[in-house]
Image (cartoon, rainbow, N blue to C red):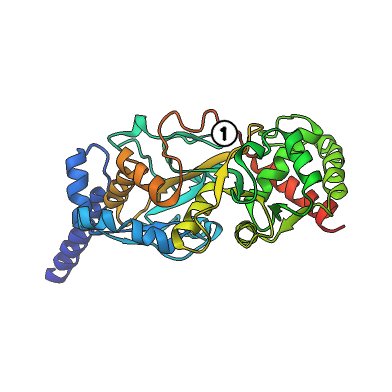
Amino acid sequence: MRKIFTKLFSATVVAFAFSTAVQAEDLSGKSWADIEAQAKREGKVTVSVWYLQPQFRGFVKEFENKYGIKVKVPEGTQDGNINKLIAEKNLEKGKMDVIALNADRVANVANRDILTSLKQLPNFEKLNHFLQGVELGETSVGYWGNQTGFAYDPLRIKENELPQSWQDVEKYIRENPKKFGYSDPNGGSSGNAFIQRALVYVNGDYDYRTEKIDEGQIAAWKKTWAWFNERKDALIRTASNADSLTRLNDGELIIVSAWQDHLFSLQKQGAITERLKFYVPEFGMPGGGNVLTIAKNAPNPAASLLFVHWITSPETQRKLSQEFGVRPLDSESGKKDTLFFSTPWRKAEMEYFTKEVISR
């Protein structure tokens, strides 16, 4: 009888402990002061970003110093982080806390019921909820605003000579062969940005934000592929975003399609000269950004919320801009951006550009 009582008592204690642990992870109804206190007790948070990890580790030390919470920034790709998040879906506690995503990946991930709501953030309504044409909903907020455009060497071209219209670009390429560069879209999205603008200005505007591609429109893209092929001896296609900027830095190229934050980051590292400048031509180049989410089964849910609150605050957004060259985000950001193609159209663009231009 005593053994039976002992087993029942032990089972009750375990069940109570499990229930208490689960309740401890439920932050709904808690005040922000309680969440901050719990975050400090958790004492750590994992933040999974897929780019600029070494620089990001340095940047988050301010958070660590302010709150006494250790931030781990692991190595990993965006696809790898998403796959890990999905693989851990059925665990009571996963290993992932805060996960950065490109805005156009949000819908796919959010639909899997693996992210938690961020509405408890005290400034939720003032944060960014629209990037790259995507309504972000409750499970993600924008924190990193980026922009494509043209990087150039001001020692080799005057500001009033920079191409602003699409016709200006065509004229510049014609009159300055092998001085304008864009990256292979398979190696860098700044190349995608330029190719997508070409599709709009050579083929004519079209709704490339739909989730279903139109084979008839894709067939009509031959006009744009011909535009690139006719200029193959005048345009320089580089291997990647970094290759474009390296060749601009070395003096081989004068203007290249580029990411503003990438250029700024390389300049901060001393990898390329600070002389190089960036601008967005009047015909427009795509802008967008990245978001932060929190795993539904995050091991450090309070610290995760506190980190997202810190990095999306106006003060930290300004510091991100100073450190990485990104644009600060708020509730109005993204609504007037020139948009990248939606994922199905982007995949088709890359596939057919590879087939019709690169392979020829």
Quarter where residue 129 is shown: top left
Q: Residues within 10 Å of mark 1 (few under 14, many from 20)?
A: many
Residue sitting nearer the eye, 47 or 339: 339
Residue found 27% across the figure and 35% down from its top: 122
Is residue 20 among what the camera can see?
A: no
Q: How many marks?
A: 1
Seen in the image, is 15 located left or right of residue 203? left
Q: Is residue 251 left or right of residue 53?
A: right
Is residue 80 rendered to the left or right of residue 238?
left
Q: x, y (%) of residue 158?
A: 62, 42
Q: Does the rendering let one see residue 168?
A: yes
Name, please, the residue furthest toward the bottom.
Answer: 3
Residue at screen point 45% across, 51% down: 100
Q: At label 1, which amino acid type do we have?
A: Gly
Measuring from the top left, give residue 263's x and y in whole percent. 53, 53
Q: Which quadrant of the rendered structure holds the C terminus?
A: bottom right
User: Where's residue 213, x and y in %?
Assistant: 75, 38
Residue identifier under label 1: 133
Give residue 30's quadrant in the image: top left
Q: Tell me the quarter of the picture where residue 225 sits.
A: top right
Tell me if 175 is positioned left or right of 130 in this view.
right
**Image vertical order of residue 16 relative to residue 211, above or below:** below
At mark 1, the secondary structure is: loop
Seen in the picture, residue 193 relative to 271 is either above or below; the reply is above
